[in-house]
Structures are given as structure tokens and as C-alpha cells.
Amino acid sequence: MSSAAAKPILYGYFRSSCSWRVRIALALKGIAYDLVPVNLVKDGGQQFSAEFKAVNPMQQVPALKIDGITLSQSLAIIHYLEDTHPNPRLLPQDPKKRAQVRMIADHIASGIQPLQNLSVLKQMGEKKMEWAQHCITAGFQALEQILQHTAGRYCVGDEVSMADLCLVPQVANAERFKVDMGPYPTITRINKALLELEAFRVSHPSRQPDTPAELQA
């Protein structure tokens, strides 16, 4: 089997929100893949191994080997999947809606998630819960306001988009860090609707091959 025809390989971690984004995209587009788990906490972090550094020099998950290339950065991976497997669409054809989807995805992927990522929280010591809550709350206050203008059933209108792939894992992070979701009814409503969809359920952190037994659904 040629490298272009081989099944894609996803390097990820069950709890990684960036890995979850890619798992949702793969599920929505019906792309079967093999998983190589990279445990971000075991052995001091398996992402720091020489073996994984050869896969992704940034030593972060996810990474996806697909069609003879290796990609990292979740949104870059999702853009590639969108270009090569256009159905179902994750970016609207309408330029304004497409820009709104990218804006919301970037708002989460650049403006919220990196600030409360594992590597940052390690530096925060005892204040890590407080810091994560601060970062997510500040981001969600803005996001709630934006979604009030863009949302239909989902983040932008009534079709699932790349924005939704970023939203659900970030809400899971918020819940994990005990953020009060009361002030964010639009985020909460959209998240609930998305979690009813099969692609979001099968990709959930509680249902992965590397999910610890006590956290499995």
C-alpha cells in the first residue's frame, strides 16, 4: 500500500481539546484512521520523547500523518481535510459566514485555549485553576456576545462548521475547570445541540481508546 493510500494516523491524547477538534472533523467526514496515543502527563509527557519530536518538532498534539505528509496544528489539519474531503462542508460558501466561522475558531484556538493549555498551567503552580477560570471566562464573555449575532442552531447559522469543532472541546475545558456557565446561555445551548450529534459523541474524550477506565463513558 502506498503512503498516499495508507490509513491516516492520528497522534493525540484523549483529553486534548485540540485533538478532539480533529477527531470530530475526521468523524464528520467519515475518514477512518489509526490512533497513536501520546500521553501528555505520563513519563513526564510522552510528547517530549525523541520519537514524537520527529513527528512534530513543536512536541504538541495533535499530529496527523495523511496522504504521505505529516501535519500539526488542529486548524491546519482541519483546513486540509476540508480541501481534500469537502463533504460535509465545515466552511460555508458565503464569504461573510466563512469569515465569521474562521473568526470564532481563531477566537477559541488562539485567544482562549493556548492560555489555559497544560504547558501554561504547569507554570502557574497552585494558581492554575484560578488562571484557567480567568482565561476561559474572559474569552467566553466575548464569545457569548459574538454568538448572539452569528448563531442559528449552531455557532454560525444552522450548519455545523469549524467554529463548532472548536466550541465543544472548549466548553468541556470550562466544565473541567469549574467555570460557571450561567452567564453564557448561547454557548450552553449550542454546545448541548452539538453533543447530540454522532460525530461529537464518538469523538468525545470519554470514548477514546486511551481514555482511562475511570473516565470512560
Image (cartoon, rainbow, N blue to C red):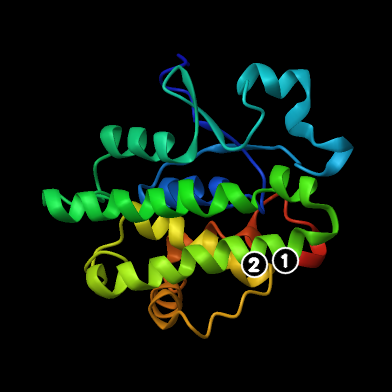
Instruction: Return the mark for residue 130.
Output: 1
Look at 79% across and 47% down and name the residue there.
Answer: 122
SS for tag 1?
Answer: helix
The amino acid beneath tag 2 is Gln
Residue ranking furthest to the left: 94
Residue ranking furthest to the right: 43
Left or right, 78 with respect to 38, comes to: left
The image position of residue 26, as x and y in percent, is 43, 45
The image position of residue 211, as x and y in percent, is 73, 55
The amino acid beneath tag 1 is Glu
Instruction: Return the mark for residue 209.
Output: none
Left or right, 20 with respect to 213, comes to: left
The image position of residue 189, as x and y in percent, is 40, 80
Residue ranking furthest to the bottom: 182
Q: Is residue 214 above or below residue 182?
A: above
**In 3D space, how far apart are the residues under numbered discs 1 and 2 (Cα atoms)?**
5 Å
- Quadrant containing the C terminus is bottom right
SS for tag 2?
Answer: helix
Relative depth, front residue between 16 and 95: 95
- Quadrant for residue 19, please give it: top right
Q: Is residue 191 above or below residue 160?
A: below
Judging by the rendered image, the residue that carries numbered circle 2 is 133
Look at 76% across and 58% down and name the residue there.
Answer: 128
Q: Are marks 1 and 2 in contact (CB under 8 Å)?
A: yes
State how many labels appear: 2
Relative depth, front residue between 134 and 212: 134
Q: Callout 2: few (<14), some (14-19), or many (20+) C-alpha neighbours within 10 Å?
A: many
Relative depth, front residue between 33 and 177: 177
Q: Is residue 160 above or below residue 111?
A: below
- Note whether residue 154 is visible: no
Left or right, 117 with respect to 195, comes to: right
